[in-house]
Image (cartoon, grey):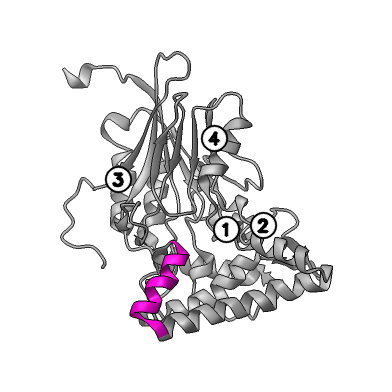
């Protein structure tokens, strides 16, 4: 009988990324145009499912691979921050995110109430402010002291997190100059001991340019690739697209081009720098090949960041996985069949007795086990 059967797996690893929890669907009595996450109930159901039934007595590790909290999608707070972002402002943004999604944080606490559960939170480019000590402490303070030790927050910088031999997890923004930040050098302190976060120029661009246009057209950050956005936009919404294009170009000229010019005053070097800076959503084909070449023992590389779910087996038996996102995504490349919302995540089951690290790895789409009468559109 099923209930007498011994669990054939000793551990399961779940990897999710890019949920982008903001300040909630409504903020200050109005609809919040910056919010991208509308699947609180589905996430609660997801965490409950992997805490019960056949998983109840199994060791579980939930890896949140970046951009779970979206500090960049929180409406303006009362602190005025220009070049650097104050720790106080980041704390207020964290409070707004928690207030906007109380069910999620309660579900995370319930998930951790089982001693066999742990959460690894890898910092991405939208939740980079978690590197600030007080912000990290306040996030951990959301959970009871008895379970707090089962949560670990890490910043990869140029490295990766390896939960088991041959498994490697990295968010993916680390490959892009526009979004890269260093967990130590990105923190500055004034003469009074107050700490500030120094964002990447990509973070500045999101808050100062992209968010303003998103308030007009909420879909603008959901369309990939960016080149197709401009091409289709010129056909269907030319005035809006032209405004967005020139605002983006002007921002880059003012923030990066002039900076390079003052440093080098050499057209060739400026052009080389500009190309590197604008390599948004880098070609993961080459990134993957470079990563696999530099590792001697690898079974799987799992990334996020681009919001495009992908499961790609390799000839040597290893796999490349992009866990996608739980927000809306519209891909205008005809070679990519992604549209709307796919609640994708990776599942890695580790057998009780296995040889040669034969992990069972899959990319799943969460459909839910509870019938929900409606979801946010």
Q: In x, y percent, where is residue 165?
A: 54, 25
Few, some or many residues within 10 Å of mark 3 (<14, 14–19, 20+): some
| Residue 125 tag number | 1
Few, some or many residues within 10 Å of mark 4 (<14, 14–19, 20+): many
Question: Could you tell me how far apart the alpha carbons at marks 2 and 3 are, in whole angstroms?
Answer: 31 Å
Which residue is rendered at x = 82% and y = 73% of the image? 262
Residue wearing tag 3: 365
Numbered range of the magenta stretch: 225-238
Residue wearing tag 2: 181
> Do labels 3 and 4 touch, CB within 8 Å?
no
Question: Could you tell me how far apart the alpha carbons at marks 3 and 1 are, in whole angstroms?
Answer: 24 Å
Kindly state the secondary structure of the residue where label 2 is placed: loop
Residue wearing tag 4: 168
Instruction: Specify which label sits upstream in the sequence, 2 or 3.
Output: 2
Kindly state the secondary structure of the residue where label 4 is placed: strand
Q: In x, y percent, where is residue 201?
A: 65, 67
> Do labels 2 and 1 touch, CB within 8 Å?
yes
Secondary structure mostly seen in the magenta stretch: helix
> Do labels 4 and 2 touch, CB within 8 Å?
no
């Amino acid at each position: 009988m099923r209930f007498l059967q011994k669990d054939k797996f000793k551990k399961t690893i779940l990897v999710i990324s890019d949920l982008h929890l903001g300040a909630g669907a409504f903020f200050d009595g109005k609809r919040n145009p910056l919010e991208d996450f509308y699947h609180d109930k589905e996430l609660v159901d997801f965490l409950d499912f992997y805490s019960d039934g056949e998983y109840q007595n199994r060791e579980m590790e939930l890896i949140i691979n970046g951009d779970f909290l979206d500090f960049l999608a929180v409406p303006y707070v009362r602190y005025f921050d220009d070049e650097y972002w104050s720790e106080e402002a980041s704390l207020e943004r964290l409070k707004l995110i928690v207030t906007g999604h109380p069910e999620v944080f309660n579900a995370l606490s319930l998930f951790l109430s089982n001693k066999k559960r742990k959460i690894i939170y890898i910092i991405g480019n939208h939740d980079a402010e978690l590197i600030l000590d007080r912000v990290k402490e306040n996030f951990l303070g959301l959970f009871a002291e008895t379970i707090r030790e089962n949560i670990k927050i890490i910043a990869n910088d140029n490295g990766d997190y390896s939960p088991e031999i041959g498994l490697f997890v990295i968010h993916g923004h680390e490959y892009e100059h526009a979004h890269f930040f260093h967990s130590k050098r990105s923190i500055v302190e004034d003469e009074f001991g107050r700490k500030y976060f120094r964002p990447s120029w990509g973070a500045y661009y999101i808050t100062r340019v992209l968010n303003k246009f998103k308030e007009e057209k909420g879909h603008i950050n959901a369309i990939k690739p960016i080149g197709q956005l401009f091409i289709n936009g010129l056909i269907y919404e030319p005035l809006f697209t032209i405004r967005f294009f020139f605002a983006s170009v002007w921002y880059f000229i003012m923030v990066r081009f002039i900076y390079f010019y003052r440093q080098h005053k050499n057209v060739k070097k400026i052009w080389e720098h500009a190309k590197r800076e604008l390599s948004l959503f880098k070609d993961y084909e080459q990134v993957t090949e470079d990563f696999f070449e530099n590792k001697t023992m690898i079974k799987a590389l799992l990334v996020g960041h681009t919001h495009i779910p992908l499961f790609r087996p390799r000839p040597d038996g290893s796999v490349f996985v992009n866990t996608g996102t739980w927000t809306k995504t519209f891909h205008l490349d005809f070679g990519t069949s992604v549209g709307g919302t796919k609640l994708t995540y990776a599942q890695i089951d580790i057998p009780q007795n296995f040889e040669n690290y034969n992990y069972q790895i899959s990319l799943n789409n969460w459909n839910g086990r509870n019938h929900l009468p409606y979801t946010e559109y």
